[in-house]
Image (cartoon, grey):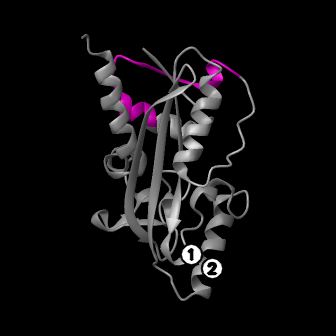
Amino acid sequence: MTLVVATTNGHKLAEIARILDGLDCAVEPISAHASTPPPEETGRTFEENARLKALHYGRLVPHLTVADDSGLEIDDLDGEPGVRSARFGGPTYLEKFALIYERLRARAALGSPARFVCAVAVAERGDVVFEARGTIEGRIADRPAGDGGFGYDPIFFYPPYDSTLAEVSAERKAAVSHRGHAFRKLRAFLASRATPI
């Protein structure tokens, strides 16, 4: 079985490959199969964007194609950046962090509750055949910390670990992360498909 992952983000691909390791399934990036501009993410929810991307890329390859849409929801910013997480603020994460802290300070809401969300969709021959959602609850850290992980990990404080997700190993992060939760559900789905009837 081949699973094509519709991402150009090397960090995300590596994280997904670790979660699916051990399955009788080749995990390959979309770049190994097709070169096409990404679709415009017009969905209002993570689920809508995941479906949109899975179907877009799934039409280009003869394999199961998985796409995810994920991001950070901050309660005291009315759920922002949400589905706009990758496009929020400036082009660098330092700029995104600065804007988040500026807005939280303006609302006297430093330390706001927050969550990471990941929606996963798998397309096969033009149809969505599997969907899953994973979340992790935490809060915005007092300041960015840690040099592991990627994206918003340095500002996401996870109380059970007493640290940000950028301060823990990839294995500890995957054990609790939004992407870990969603892709372990995908792992179970792929394992069931591989089981002879």
Q: Which residues are magenta?
A: 16-34
Question: At which x and y percent is residue 16?
Answer: 44, 35
State the residue lying farthest toward the front: 127
Q: Is residue 5 magenta?
A: no
**Residue 9 showing in the rendered view:** no
- Callout 1: helix, strand or loop? helix
Amino acid carrying label 2: it is: Arg
Query: Which one is in front, 179 or 154?
Result: 179
Q: Are marks 2 and 1 in contact (CB under 8 Å)?
A: yes
Question: At which x and y percent is residue 168?
Answer: 37, 55
Amino acid carrying label 1: it is: Leu
- Whether 182 is drawn above or below 156: the answer is above
Query: Which one is in front, 8 or 85?
Result: 85
Q: Residues within 10 Å of mark 2 (few under 14, many from 20)?
A: some
- Callout 2: helix, strand or loop? helix
Which residue is tagged 2? Answer: 103
Residue at horizontal 47 percent and vertical 40 percent from the top:
120
Q: Is residue 29 magenta?
A: yes
Q: Which circle marks residue 77 in the picture? A: 1
Give how far apart the Cα atoms at labels 2 and 1 are. 8 Å
Quarter holding residue 113: bottom left
Quarter holding residue 136: bottom left
**Residue 61 showing in the rendered view:** yes
Q: Earlier in the sequence, mark 2 or mark 1?
A: 1
Query: Which one is in front, 84 or 173?
Result: 84
Residue at horizontal 29 percent and vertical 23 percent from the top:
192
